[in-house]
Amino acid sequence: MSGHNKWSTIKHKKGKADAARGKIFSRLVKEISVAARQGGGDVDMNPRLRVAVDAARGQNMPNDNIERAIKRGTGELEGVTYEEMLYEAYGPGGVAIIIEVLTDNKNRAAAEIRHSLTKGGGSLGSKNSVAYLFNKQGQICIDGTAHTEDEVLEAGLEAGLEDVAVVEEIIIASTAPDDVFTVKDAMEAAGIKVISSEVTKVPSNTVLLSGKEAIRTMKLLEALEDIDDVQALFSNFDMDD
């Protein structure tokens, strides 16, 4: 599957294993609020909001929390206003990194990102220095122990499914960004339980690293992900076997 690499798999495992529930909820609340502020509070009319709400429900966030986050975004409740920022950077070995930020303090976010990059052997890039290496893609994750690739293909092809791959017993179905919900709905109608669905960024090529350079890159990416203001992180890093 184009763009999927071992770093993505590691992130998935790491998130399941040790990500603090409070941090996950905090990031989801911020995303819901910003999505509602930009596109309104109607989930059916706001694709970005639907992605965020689906992700929140996938993490078993209470409906009251979701509703409050939406109302803060639409202005029905008072709340913090978050700004969106995007950083492009390089890691060890020329790895490309995109860092998406939602923050209520731009100076704090910038300082923490620069510190992590410097400490981890990376550097900030100029605008559009690495963004062109990534493409938007819809991705739907299905439990590979409960369903087969053939079942997923049969359920999703007519709705716009483009490709499937199996990584660590997870079936990853890829779609065009605008088709992700149509395909997800078709799968659920066919009785396939969807773990998660999102519009993400996948690299058009990968940088293969091994040994100390690979370890250093993993530590840098993990340090960046641990910054509270970092909402999403994308890289074309992959590890040599």
Image (tube, grey):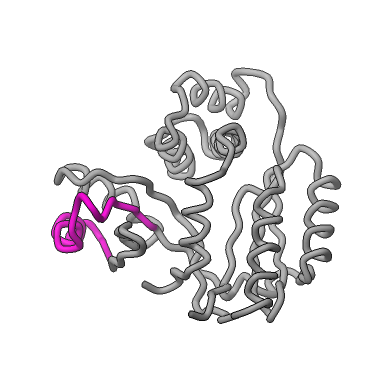
Observer-nearest of 181 and 224? 224
- Relative horizontal placement of residue 143, taking residue 132 as reference (left or right): left
Counting from the top left corner in percent of width and height, residue 176 is at 36, 62
The image quadrant of residue 213 is: bottom right
- Relative horizontal placement of residue 113, taking residue 148 as reference (left or right): right
**Magenta highlight on residue 159:** yes
Counting from the top left corner in percent of width and height, residue 103 is at 73, 42
Counting from the top left corner in percent of width and height, residue 83 is at 71, 42
* Residue occupying image coordinates x 64% and y 73%: 96
Magenta-drawn segment? 139-162
Observer-nearest of 98 and 180? 98
* Residue occupying image coordinates x 35% and y 64%: 167
* Number of numbered discs on residues: 0
Residue 75 vs 211, above or below: the answer is above
Which part of the image, by quadrant, shows the N terminus?
bottom left
- Relative horizontal placement of residue 97, taking residue 2 as reference (left or right): right
Counting from the top left corner in percent of width and height, residue 3 is at 45, 71
- Relative horizontal placement of residue 238, taking residue 116 as reference (left or right): left
Residue 185 vs 90, above or below: the answer is above
**Magenta highlight on residue 183:** no
Observer-nearest of 5 and 76? 5
* Residue occupying image coordinates x 34% and y 45%: 195
